[in-house]
Amino acid sequence: MMIVTMVLRWVCVYYRGPGVAVMVLSWIITLYTLWQMVELHEIVPGKRFDRYHELGQHAFGEKLGLWVVVPQQLMVEIGVNIVYMITGGNSLKKIHDISCPGCKSIKTTYFIMIFASVQFVLSHLPSFNSITGVSFAAAAMSLSYSTIAWVASANKGVQPDVQYGPRASTTTGSVFNFFSALGDVAFAYAGHNVALEIQATIPSTPEKPSKKPMWKGVIMAYIVVALCYFPVSMVGYRVFGKDVEDNILISLEKPKWLIATANMFVVIHVIGSYQIFAMPVFDMIEAFFIVKMNFKPTKFLRFLIRNGYVALTMFLAITFPFFGGLLSFFGGFAFAPTTYYLPCIMWLAICKPKRFSLSWFTNWFCIIVGVTLMILAPIGALRQIVLQAKGYKFYS
């Protein structure tokens, strides 16, 4: 089970208190809600809910389920793909700048286009099964570059002029930055949006239901997530303080060969992860054109849809490369519903736990946390995007 692994940035500023609490609480809540989705996959005997919207339709009804789930899921998957385009382009540029410090500077736009060229090819793989190798490579790279990041930071040592505390000089700025940080944390846990699609690839029988191997995979994934997030955020903040970059690999400069290698691992990771989140979008778009618009399921239609989608995410990434702001906005506005509280609402609707029981209280607590994230995070993110956009030149 692949889960997004981005370096948490603003939340590191609150390392000594709320930051750690938010990261740990999010880890626990999202593990719980992912367990719910694994259990709900075959909650009806003889039927498997292989798509998030199918589970939503069972919980809320045929029409309402689609309107509740599909827009949120599409925002998550498209948002992730845009951020991955930006991440891949920035990492490629970092590799170029490290490897050839005396060379002429090349626009980030071109590196995003290079990254997109790989996705134009991979987007024509037929299904999740065909990207298994890419997914495992992405997971391995994620753990590798995260380990390099925190080990290299620890080896660098605390900087002599390091300063801890909020970046903003005003209380208002600090509050908005904290709101933005909540979105960053929410963005980190995106696996719920493709969990059912992945579980659908696992054979299932009454004697050996798919939820058992799926849950083992989830546990392993969350161990990897903890090994990626917590050391990077805490060690990175300890070493660089409030001046740590959105991506800690940018803060690190030496040894050059190691930082270049880590950035290459990032590129490999986001190449594979892009496809994991793009596959469900391809399925939705193709199903819409074939079922609703009565198009013939030809290879040419598939070619146009998949290349068009990659081109769209590339264009948006080039036009709005505000990595930090987009990370937080999508994390709060789109990820919080599908990750933090929609699974809980569906659990309450389908399983109907007894009122005031432990399950009832737990689910309502997660719902309240998720709704709070959805409201607060986009506020901080939009403010950050506005501030970044003031001095930005398009297609620079």
Image (cartoon, rainbow, N blue to C red):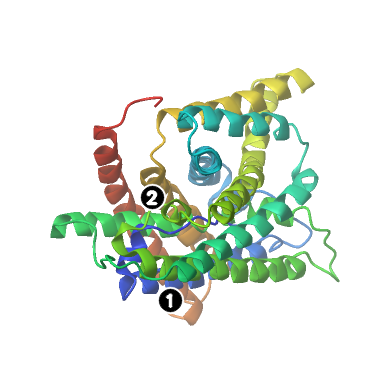
Residue at 65 percent of width and 71 percent of height: 219
Q: Secondary structure at mark 1?
A: helix
Mark 2 or mark 1, which is nearer to you? 2
Say which of 13 and 147 sits in front.
Answer: 147
User: What's the CA distance linking mark 2 and mark 1?
Assistant: 28 Å
Instruction: Determine crowd level at label 1: few under 14, some 14-19, many 20+ residues with C-alpha closer than 10 A.
Output: some
Instruction: Determine crowd level at label 2: few under 14, some 14-19, many 20+ residues with C-alpha closer than 10 A.
Output: many
Q: Is residue 220 shown above or below 71? A: below
Name which of mark 2 and mark 1 comes first in the sequence. Answer: 2
Residue 1 seen by the camera: no
Q: Secondary structure at mark 2?
A: helix
Give the x, y percent position of residue 304.
67, 20
Which label was assigned to residue 130?
none
Residue placed under numbered mark 1 in the picture: 361
Give the quadrant of the C terminus: top left
Residue placed under numbered mark 2 in the picture: 328
Q: Are marks 2 and 1 in contact (CB under 8 Å)?
A: no
Residue 89 seen by the camera: yes
Say which of 42 and 60 sits in front.
Answer: 42
Q: Is residue 86 shown above or below 143? A: above
Give the x, y percent position of residue 386.
26, 38
**Relative side of 239 to 242, left or right:** right
What residue type is disc 2 on? Ser
Q: Is residue 158 shown above or below 130? A: below
Residue at 52 percent of width and 37 percent of height: 89
**Relative side of 354 to 19, left or right:** right
Residue at 32 percent of width and 27 percent of height: 393
Give the x, y percent position of residue 21.
38, 74
